[in-house]
Amino acid sequence: MATRFFSHFHYLVNIFCSWLIQVSRLLVLVILVVYSYYVLRQGKCKYREILDKKSSKFVYRRQPWTLLLRLVIAKDEEEVEMLDCAICLLEFEHGDKGRKLESCSHIFHDECLEKWLIHGKGQATCPLCRSVVIIIPQDMVLEEHHKIIEDDTEHRTNIFEEELALLLLSGLTSTGCCTR
């Protein structure tokens, strides 16, 4: 009876050990993904804090009676001032979120301005007048540059290792070492 118990116990331990490696790999992968997501979100939060200080948010609400009044008073279509986003070239619709830059008072859709400013290298400028909206500290730019270089180096190392493994495996299969 005791030997039967130990054989079952030994069998369960073997199964546990074989799955332990796979579960630990999966756990490490999940932790890395969560950490990288956290780091990415932190960077965006810092950037948004700076953007919030340098601009004011609004929600566009068009009153039907003011639009009608403008159309009646205006003689030409050119005199009717419609609010347009200079980035996407679309008119503001009722309920659209926007931002007004403090430095130059230009108005854009919130999402359009965020995308525009994120692509700036070292400084973010107004799309219309090119006045500086956000000056990104040099250490943040250098930090991002180093991250890109490290990622590229790691990627190249992984590609080299994969090519080496494929080369070695192709050599083994051609000589017949791996045949059954």
Image (cartoon, rainbow, N blue to C red):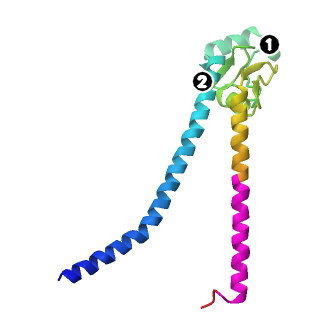
Quadrant hosting residue 45: top right
Q: Is residue 159 left or right of residue 24?
A: right
Residue most toward the bottom? 180
The residue where tag 2 is placed is: 49
Camera-side residue of 108 and 67: 108
- Residue plotted at (37% across, 69% down): 16
Camera-side residue of 107 and 132: 132
Q: Helix or strand or loop: what does disc 1 sit on?
A: helix
Quarter of the picture containing the C terminus is: bottom right
Q: Nearer the viewer, mark 2 or mark 1?
A: 2
Camera-side residue of 23 and 54: 23
- Residue 35 vs 100, above or below: the answer is below
User: Mark number for residue 148?
Assistant: none
Identify the magenta region: 154-177
Asked if labels 1 and 2 touch by Cβ distance under 8 angstroms, the answer is: no
Could you tell me if residue 61 is visible in this image? no
Quadrant hosting residue 159: bottom right
- Residue plotted at (69% across, 71% down): 165
**Residue 109: x %, y % from top left:** 67, 26
The residue where tag 1 is placed is: 79
Quarter of the picture containing the N terminus is: bottom left
**Residue 146: x %, y % from top left:** 71, 40
What residue type is disc 2 on?
Answer: Glu
Gap in Å between the C-alphas at discs 2 and 1?
A: 37 Å
Could you tell me if residue 149 is visible in this image? yes
